[in-house]
Image: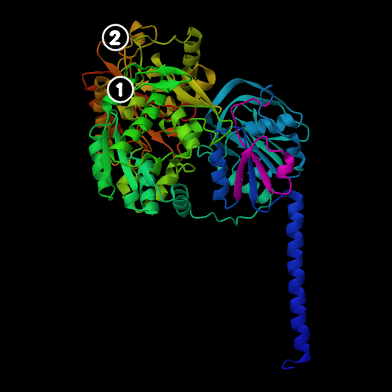
Amino acid sequence: PLLPRKMHVQSRTVVVAGAVAAAAAVLWYLAKKRKGGHLNRVAILDAGAQYGKLIDRRVRECKVESIVLPLSTPASELKGNYGAIIISGGPGSCYAPDAPAFDKEVLDLGIPIFGVCYGYQLLNFAKGGQVELADKREDLQEHISVDTKDCKLFAGMQDKQRALLTHGDAVKRIAPGFRAVSWNTEGKVVAIANDKANLYGVQFHPEVDLTEKGMEMFNNFLFNIAGLSPTYTPKSRHQAALDEIRGIVGQKEVLVLVSGGVDSSVCAALCKEALGEKRVHAVHVDHGFMRKNESELVEQALGAQGIVLHMARVAKEFEEACTSVKGKTVGPLGKTISPEAKRMIIGDTFMRITDSAIADLKINPDNVFLAQGTLRPDLIESGSHIASAKADVIKTHHNDTALVRKLRDEGKIVEPLKDYHKDEVRALGKELGLPHELVWRQPFPGPGLAIRVLCSDGKAPEALSDKDFISVMQVANAYTAASLSVCELPVRSVGVQGDCRSYKAAIALTLPTETPIKDIDWTTLFAISRRIPSEVKDISRTCFMWGPPITSSAPATRAVAPTCCTQDVMDQLREADAIVTKVMIKYQLEYKISQMPVVLLPATFGEAGKRSIVLRPFITRDFMTGKPAVPGEELPFEALDEMVKGIRALPHVARVCYDLTAKPPGTTEWE
């Protein structure tokens, strides 16, 4: 009665209009749900990828929720619940009798699908195309051409870009209804599309940093093709980690293994914040494989953060340690050659030392959990079912051995960082207020220098064939007219190729004369190293080596010193590592170079009592893929010169090498 009649009509009109709009929104939502699934949720079907968690991370960085599911997930579980599907890479072959199970009806749900590597091959194969073993493997960052005019996946991009290709199978015939939308430098198809059905597949890996426009591809798929919205806001990961620790531990106590690296330091800081100082016991294990003065520096750095360390000095116990693998005793460590056996012994011995620490600290063993700074790459490379049901074992990490898995199954382990990559841990470390020098401390593996010594019984492995060396020289000659000499290093090293573990030969290139570091043609050397693994299947690493030219025809290249994880051998590596560390600090490179493994090889090159050293300066963000540092760019010539001269002056060093290999095909560490 206080309003004019006209205004009553207008107000009712507004209400009705609002109700109609709301109803329309509900109908649109339900229609959208019927068409393709929940508005902003992506199903990632995991085929055993090394990079599966990176896909999940990239989607969430686009502010879209994602759920990682087994590749075998039936179509009935996906229908009406997801707005898009991504099929990951994996180590298998989609045409093989033992190929991972997959419900082909998934491809007919009308949901937009993006197949990556194995997912690309599976998409083509399931739709009637042909996939076969490729003429040669590809494990390199390569230039590709993409269709930017008619393919929505590549819209808005340059038609030339670089991407990571790592695969042994290839599409031989494109499935009906699909067309080629990307090609490598040889003109071979590396991406296909069925625009009408919204099905897309790429042979390369858009989820890794080595694919330069990968995030743009995810954006195009999620928003321009699938029509999703960037509205997902995840719960604070910091708070989620605290909640996880409190939920698992309850009113009990925690023992944290602290190496002094950023992973274990952040884990310790989280436990302290979640539970309080009195319920957290930090233990540092000096197993005899630490860097020079490392344990003392760790104790000081963490002491400054109010974390009191219980120091366990157990070098003798580790050197004499054994373990059981499939019912057989393996060890002692001081006489063990196999890299996998070394890792298993070290990981299981850590657990046994933990039991001793619990007794020393007078903690009730029934009232304590073990906390570890385990990261996602550790679990992926170890083939843990936590990370992937189908992932291949690349190398067993010390925090994921059989004994650790047993304790995990018993609910006795807390791992608040298990879904993190290294850069994410550093970001959390900053948020926790840890000092810059601790957050950016050079990564150092839990097993320490033990996995940076390539052990040997004194016998060189079987040599590469003459045909292999001819192929290597053909690659070298295609890139340079310089007279390069090639020799095989008398070791094998671990690699990752096509989501699978490799254990292959390493070679070294030498120049005809001693050349100043700044005058070496590093660009050409890196180009040769990228191509060799594709041309010679038994080689996964290529190095440059200082000193006089030498080829594998020289008997000295087969000379190997018996080498195990004994303290005299550790001391040789410690001295070389200390020289590199000193130079890194001098030039402030510890914040620029992601990791700097210094590796000892048993290669004597005919000089009795000596061994050789490899420098492995590595650039990466997530440690799943990466590239070697380029001298003169990420690594100053002056710094490298000081490192090499200092190491070559050591009386026990025969040769010094520079690892030119990216990841893949080589892992960050050599074993």
Location of residue 375 (image quadrant): top left
Tell me what residue is drawn at x 78 percent, y 88 percent: 6
**Can see residue 85?**
yes
CA distance for labels 2 and 1? 28 Å
Residue 89 belongs to magenta span: yes
List the single residue furthest toward the bottom: 2
Q: Nearer the viewer, residue 341 or 189?
A: 341
Residue 613, percent from left and from top: 31, 22
Nearer the observer, 61 or 514: 61
Left or right of 131, for residue 177: right
In the image, 105 versus 509, the foreground residue is 105
Instruction: Quadrant for the C terminus, please.
Output: top left
Which residue is under mark 2? Answer: 606
> Quadrant of the rendered structure where residue 526 is?
top left
Q: Left or right: 26 with respect to 442?
A: right
Q: What amino acid type should be assigned to the residue bearing mark 1?
A: Glu
Q: Which residue is mark 1?
A: 319
Residue 477 picture location, percent across and down: 47, 17
Residue 13 lies in the magenta stretch: no
Given residues 205 and 54, the one toward you in this image is 54
> Please, what secondary structure does the residue beneath circle 2 have?
loop
Q: Please name the residue shown 54% across and 22% down the image.
A: 534
Q: Is residue 368 visible?
A: no
The three-letter code of the residue at mark 2 reads Gly
Discs 2/1, front: 1
What stretch of residues is rendered in magenta? Answer: 65-94
The residue at the point 69 percent across, 21 percent down is 97
Which image quadrant for residue 17? bottom right
Is 10 situated above or below 188? below
Q: How is the image coloured?
A: rainbow
Label 1 element class: helix
